[in-house]
Image (cartoon, helix red, strand yellow):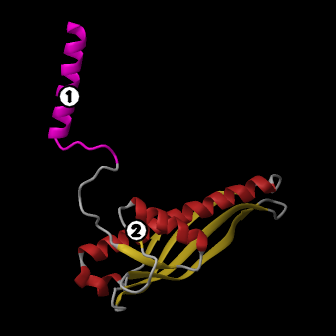
Amino acid sequence: MIRFLTTFLSLVAVVAILSGCGFHLRGQSEEASPLPAYYLDVSDRTFGSELKRQLIQAGGGTASDREGSSVIEITDVATTRVTTTVDAEGRTTGIRLRMELTFRLLSEKGLVLVDHQTLHAQDDLSYDHTIILQMQAKEGELKKSLHQKLAKQLLEKLLQEQANPDKASLLSTTTRSVA
């Protein structure tokens, strides 16, 4: 009985100490969300779903109606596939995938906060022509990874815009590339 009581009191003390120091379980934040709900105007569904996932994960959200919401307008998502190396027989042994994303950010009133800005991401893949199906699967994974990188870059731009709304003109003149 004494052992149970000491164990119980020790557990209560640990919980009190952890809650007193500001410790919270993952997902239990009491801070206000740094991102509002955005309406996503995206024609590329794969990128759109990745962006939506990362927005929600970052504490923001998506709006179902364009009226009264800030708008993330993705005007272009382009993928370029370039052969980087070939073997002695002229067969591809390495490729580079490069994605470019062009977007703009509009306020709730339709004002342009960030005008057409381009983000880049690229990665290389060693290619083996004898296992084509596996290479296609790896290429698909690489495209997914590039979508994740671009969505992360875009979220960083949104957070910058939230922190410095008066500096939209500076954001609209820069481009960013991740290798």
Residue plotted at (55% across, 64% down): 146
Query: What amino acid type is highlighted by mark number 1?
Result: Val
**Residue drawn at (20%, 14%), measured in percent from left and top?**
5
Q: Nearer the viewer, residue 19 or 155?
A: 19
Q: Quick check: can you spot residue 73?
A: yes
Going by the image, does 5 lie left or right of 160?
A: left
The residue that disc 2 covers is 61
Q: Quadrant of residue 111?
A: bottom left
Q: Quarter of the image containing the N terminus?
A: top left
**Mark 1 to mark 2 CA distance (whole Å):** 35 Å
Residue 84 at x, y percent in the picture? 67, 66
Q: Which mark is residue 14?
A: 1
81 relative to 20, above or below: below
Residue 76 picture location, percent across and down: 55, 82
Residue positioned 57% across, 72% down in the render: 99
Image quadrant assignment for residue 49: bottom right
Q: Give the class, few, some or many, for how many residues have Cα within 10 Å of label 2's Cα (few <14, many ≥20).
A: some
